[in-house]
Image: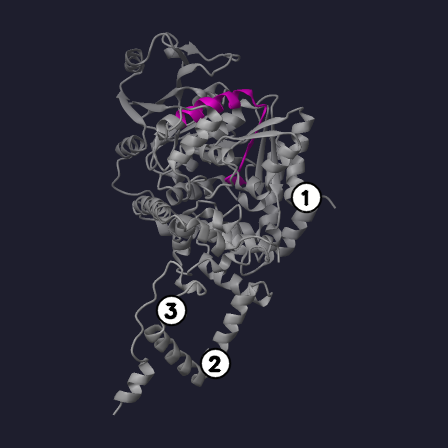
Amino acid sequence: MTSRDKILTAVMLNQPELTALPTLSFPEEEGINPIEKFITTLTGIGGQVINVSGYDAIKNHISKTTNPNTRLITNITVLDDIAEMLIEHPGSLQDVELAIIKAHFGVAENGAVWVTEDALGGHRVLPFICQHLAVVLSANDIVADMHRAYERIGDDAYGFGTFIAGPSKTADIEQSLVLGAHGARSMTVFLMK
Amino acid sequence: MENHKDHAELAEVFNKDEQRVDWHDETLWWIRQKRDKSVNQIPEWELLRDTASQIKNNVLSNLSSYLRQFETKAEAKGVIVHWAADAAEHNQIVLEILKSNGINKMVKSKSMLTEECHLNEFLEQQGVEVIDSDLGERIVQLAKEPPSHIVLPCIHKKKEEIGELFHKYLGTPAGNADPQFLTETARQHLRETFLTRRAALTGVNFAIAETGEFVVCTNEGNADMGAHLADVHIASMGIEKIIPQRKHLGVFLRLLTRSATGQPITTYSSHFSKPRKDKEIHIIIVDNGRTVQLGREDFRNSLKCIRCGACMNTCPVYRRSGGHSYHNAISGPIGSILAPNLDMEKYADLPFASTLCGSCSNVCPVKIDIHQQLYKWRQVIVKNGYTTKAKTAAMQVMSWTLASPTAYHTAGKAGRLTLKYAPFMVNNKLNPWYKHRDMPEPPKESFGEWYNKNRK
């Protein structure tokens, strides 16, 4: 008997009588402005939110805050004049200073944004390996909580998807919070109104 | 009986440095308070716990179908699924995957299962170098110690000790113990590792039967850095990591990190569904005693655990005895109900390392009746004859005393007189009840004696 069959047989013999799955009934919390909540939460966990009216404002902000001699990368076509376009073989991404990507939506209760690999041109490592991460998010695309988030994701057939909530961090040394553990040192969300 | 120190003896070593004990205690309690603050912001918290508990009950009751469903879905997406009956088979599978790809160096993110299987030691004996990439795990790896906490692996270490380790192994200046500086050093050192390793192993927080995908949660981004840069990604999971549907992640991801550290969610919650083009994802599904636990009616609920560590942070015994005193990969209250299933004799001491105060059960996000299981394990262990001789003898004396009213009254009187006139008889090194503890002032008389005198 293979280990697979041994395990499955043992599980079958030992599992208790079938109990029902509960229905998920988590109504959206009332009286909460999801945009404000998203901004407060993300700021509270070390992220930064910048309200912008369009891509010109994003370009303006990036050119003011980024060293022009560093590598910027994006797959948002309208940003091709300030950043290198992500191609199929971009070479090593380890020297990327700033990656500018699009998120599908944000989650108000925890400040996370949902990113799938199509928005990364298939380069899953991009939002982790870059020194700094910028995310473009429409203010209309903020859901209240994780239940709404998964309703929105539905049965999307992504190969890889991730919630990103703020910069990479650790508190492993005496519980002192340090931003920039292995992933991006900062996370800026450009909130497009 | 195998010769190893038990919880009380190991705790005694930890307790020698009283200041460190206080610091450890306060640090963990501070994390417990952060959890409370975060949890109190969620009005439906108790409903979330109830729902999570019921989902996990359903998982245990239908696990064989869910495992099959998960396997079919994952394989349909090009993921290679392996099954390991025990730790040795798990380790062998990892080794074979590495060998068949000609790899002898691997980077690993946090996986308590690989600690349970002693994978690092095994691979090192086979000539494979393993580097742990979670900062806390890297620190204990350099110190040649096991993690002392499932979420905070080096919570027992002072920053000065970490500074010394980094000085010795990573060449930082002597005496530098600045967390910011040390973290930056680890970032640079491990970046090189991530870029050059062709294999990465991660744990699994949740595996979804409905879709065949699995989710890995980290704050540091180390699991993603490893997995996305390597040719081969190996993900090790216990059979109990299954949840039925993707939407159930909404419940568990709301509970997990709030319970663990008080954060609303980990920085990264990554959903792996398909391998990248020309790359491999392997999933190893491990039993290693879990099916036996599933068959123990009183203890199967322990398999609902999502490894948040809240029960450790709140436990008055864990906080004051340290994770290493549990001599098991998973320490604290949850470790104490999981370990006896693996080896009842070796871990017979752990269910006794508790005050049964119930704080663990109160914070558990999936409502495991941890303290009740601790109590039940004690009975099983005593019935099976695994308690120490001194405890058995003491319990027999107590049982005889409590069963006889005469003996009970005499013993009470003798106790009061001893504490009053001859405290040295009990307040000495031979009596473990006096270690780190002062006895209360004895009352002049018992209630029984007072009642007899005063009743009219």
Up/down of A111 relative to B394, above or below:
above
Q: Quadrant of residue B135?
A: top left
Would residue B282 appear left or right of B453 to someone viewing this image?
right
Q: Residue at x 61, y 21 (%)?
A: B278
Binning the other alpha carbons within 10 Å of mark 2 as few (below 14), some (14 to 19) or many (20 upward) gives: few
Tell whether position B200 is magenta: yes
- From this view, report whether residue B202 is shown above or below residue B304: above
Q: Secondary structure at mark 3?
A: helix
The residue segment tinted magenta is B183-209
Amino acid type, residue under disc 3 in the picture? Phe
Badge number at residue A4: 1
Q: Residue furthest right?
A: A1
For the residue pair A141 and B78, the one nearer the viewer reads as B78
* Residue B437 picture quarter: bottom left
**Crowding near pointer 3: few (<14 within 10 Å), some, many (20+)?**
few
Front residue of this view, candidates B211 and B429: B429
Does residue B421 appear in the picture of this structure?
A: yes
Q: Image point 52% across, 30% down: which residue?
A: A157
Whole-angstrom CA distance, mark 3 to mark 1, is 62 Å
Which circle marks residue B226 in the picture?
Answer: none
Residue furthest out toward the bottom: B456
Label 1: which secondary element: helix
Which residue does the image show at 44% across and 14% down from the upper left?
A95
Foreground: disc 2 or disc 1: 2
A81 vs B152, nearest the viewer: B152
The chain containing the residue under callout 2 comes to B
Give the answer, above or below, for where B18 lies relative to B358. Answer: above
